[in-house]
Structures are given as C-alpha cells and as structure tokens.
Image (cartoon, rainbow, N blue to C red):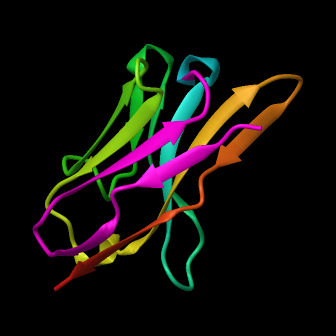
Amino acid sequence: QVLLVESGGGVVQAGGSLRLSCAASESISRFIVMGWYRQAPGKQRELVATVAVRSITNYADSVKGRFTISRDSAKNTVYLQMNSLKPEDTAVYYCNARRIVSSVVDYWGQGTQVTVSS
C-alpha cells in the first residue's frame, strides 16, 4: 500500500506564499507521474500541476507563473511552491501518484487545506 502524506497547508493572506510537501512511502521513481490536485467547496477536483519522469512539468493555466512543482528523489518527496496566492486558490490540495501496472493505478493523499484570505 502506497502512502502519500501532505503537509504545509494553512491560512495565508492574498499575495503570500506557501510550500506544500508530499512524502511518499516508497521511491517516487516508481511512479510515472506525481502531481497536485485541488478541490474547492462545491467544485470538482481539478489538476494543479504534475511532474513526470525526467522532471517534465505541466500546470493548470490558472497557476502558471505562480506555482512551481518539483521533486526530490532522495527524499521521496514532491513539493508545490505557491506564490502570489489568491483567494480563489482556497481549496483542499491533494497529492497524487500514478503508476501503470496492468492498468493505471492512482494513489491519493489525505489532503491539506489551503485558505487564502483577501
């Protein structure tokens, strides 16, 4: 069973910064892609950013230029640096890890709350 443990959420004023961390219970090199998703109240979960093998990254248009995803294989951890935060970034942020065995298998963390006050 893969465990993903998020940390780093909290309350911050608009314009501020937070860094989320996702620690995996096994080597992150075993996943083809890892990423962050978020879900605001009353909305569907949406992709925020992903980082794949060879550190290829992908971002939602709404966070481009403000958020940066990175991975540290030595620590089995993926980070999301969030700058210039806006109230609309308020959501529960979930870490995701994906691998392909005979089919796609997704693992999720428990989520961490990010609240941006105006």
Residue at position x 53%, y 62% from top?
111
Q: Quadrant of residue 88?
A: bottom left
User: Residue farthest to the top?
Assistant: 54
- Quadrant in which the C terminus appears: bottom left
Q: Quadrant of residue 12?
A: bottom left
**Vertical placement of 111 versus 81: above or below?**
below
Q: Quadrant of residue 75?
A: top left
Residue at position x 32%, y 59% from top?
62
The one of 51 and 20 positioned closer to us in this rendering: 20
**Vertical placement of 57 versus 53: above or below?**
below
Q: Image check: 5 left or right of 11?
A: right
* Camera sees residue 51: yes
Residue at position x 59%, y 60% from top?
110
- Quadrant in which the N terminus appears: top right
Q: Residue 108: x, y in percent? A: 64, 50
Q: Residue 78: x, y in percent? A: 42, 36
Q: Image check: 109 left or right of 53?
A: right
The one of 25 and 105 positioned closer to us in this rendering: 25
Q: Residue 56: x, y in percent? A: 41, 23
The span shown in magenta is 1-27
